[in-house]
């Protein structure tokens, strides 16, 4: 992939293939080919399963939308979205190994399509050809590789190009605003950005005195796009969900962070 990958490995003697994989990192395409060959395409979702992300997806992405899932890996998320009524999901990944595995696995599901592709160059697709782009770990993987800032910029530039006006880029990441907002808040993209935070799977809060907030309550951001001073995460290892809406007009050079949803109603 660049992004969502396979599951954990087993014990026993480390093979030559495993040793080679250990010498690589998440930003290296060869890492993902070796990982998928080693694991045989076992299903694995990075960060969060669809069941946890469903409230966000259903709120912002209509079921008839044309969706691009970047760095799909061997995740079940696209399959789960089809079961939930989504009808057109294009899945891409840097690894030809996992793409062939997934293409074979879902040959009987016409709503799912798979293509080997690098997120930094998606020129196969025309401008403004998707209603939604979803990334769960791909940008994070690029940030682990060589020339990370350049690679991240190339990916986000391509995402912006592919989104139709009014379209949504949903980024699920471990990166807090200090390291992700600079990549997202570029005037040339014209995005309005809403931030949400979701605890990691299995997290149990020890706080009993405060009422539990809805996960669909946006997180406030400062004028510089950062978390407010003194803001405390319920789960220190939370995942961040950036919902970036491509506006119809050019937004100029002013920051476009949003602390609350637009009154005109996000889908």
Image (tube, grey):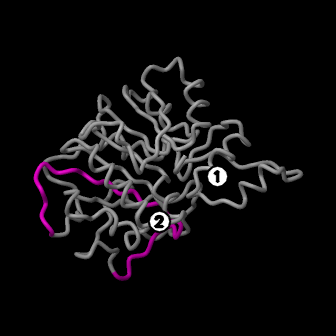
Please state which of residues 166 and 85 is positioned toward the viewer in this rendering: 166
Badge 1 marks a residue whose secondary structure is helix
Q: CA distance from mark 2 to mark 1?
A: 16 Å
In magenta stretch: residue 234: yes
In the rendered image, residue 45, in percent from the top left (x then y), is placed at 57, 45
* Disc sitting over residue 148 in the figure: 2
* Residue drawn at (28%, 50%) of the image: 160
In this rendering, the answer to whether 115 lies above or below 27 is above
The segment highlighted magenta reads 229-253
In the picture of the structure, the residue carrying the numbered disc 1 is 31
In this rendering, the answer to whether 91 lies above or below 192 is above
Q: Quadrant of residue 74?
A: top right
* Disc sitting over residue 8 in the figure: none
Badge 2 marks a residue whose secondary structure is helix
Please state which of residues 92 and 50 is positioned toward the viewer in this rendering: 92
Please state which of residues 32 and 43 is positioned toward the viewer in this rendering: 32
In this rendering, the answer to whether 40 lies above or below 139 is above
* Residue drawn at (71%, 54%) of the image: 21
**Within-10-Å neighbours for mark 1: few <14, some 14–19, many 20+:** many
Q: Quadrant of residue 98?
A: top right
In the rendered image, residue 53, in percent from the top left (x then y), is placed at 44, 46
In the rendered image, residue 2, in percent from the top left (x then y), is placed at 52, 50
| Quadrant in which the C terminus is drawn | top left
In this rendering, the answer to whether 175 lies above or below 77 is below
* Residue drawn at (55%, 42%) of the image: 73
């Amino acid at each position: 992939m660049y992004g969502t990958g396979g599951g954990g490995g087993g014990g026993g003697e480390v093979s030559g293939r495993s040793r080679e994989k250990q010498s690589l990192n998440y930003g290296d395409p060869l890492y993902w080919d070796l990982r998928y060959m080693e694991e045989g395409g076992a299903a694995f979702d990075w960060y969060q399963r669809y069941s946890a992300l469903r409230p966000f997806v259903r709120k912002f992405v209509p079921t008839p939308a044309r969706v691009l899932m970047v760095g799909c890996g061997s995740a079940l998320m696209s399959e789960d979205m089809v079961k939930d009524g989504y009808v057109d999901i294009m899945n891409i990944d840097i690894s030809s190994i996992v793409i062939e595995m997934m293409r074979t696995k879902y040959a009987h599901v016409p709503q799912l399509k798979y293509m080997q592709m690098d997120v930094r160059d998606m020129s196969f697709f025309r401008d403004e050809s998707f209603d939604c782009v979803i990334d769960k770990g791909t940008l994070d993987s690029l940030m682990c590789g060589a020339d990370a800032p350049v690679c991240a910029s190339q990916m986000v530039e391509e995402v912006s190009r592919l989104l139709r006006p009014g379209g949504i880029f949903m980024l699920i990441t471990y990166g807090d605003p200090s390291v992700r907002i600079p990549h997202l808040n570029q005037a040339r993209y014209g995005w309005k950005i809403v931030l949400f935070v979701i605890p990691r799977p299995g997290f149990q809060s020890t706080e009993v005195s405060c009422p539990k907030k809805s996960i669909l309550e946006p997180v406030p951001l400062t004028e510089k796009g950062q978390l407010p001073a003194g803001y405390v995460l319920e789960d220190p290892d939370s995942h961040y969900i950036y919902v970036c809406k491509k506006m119809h007009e050019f937004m100029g050079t002013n920051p476009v962070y949003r602390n609350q949803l637009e009154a005109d109603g996000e889908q």
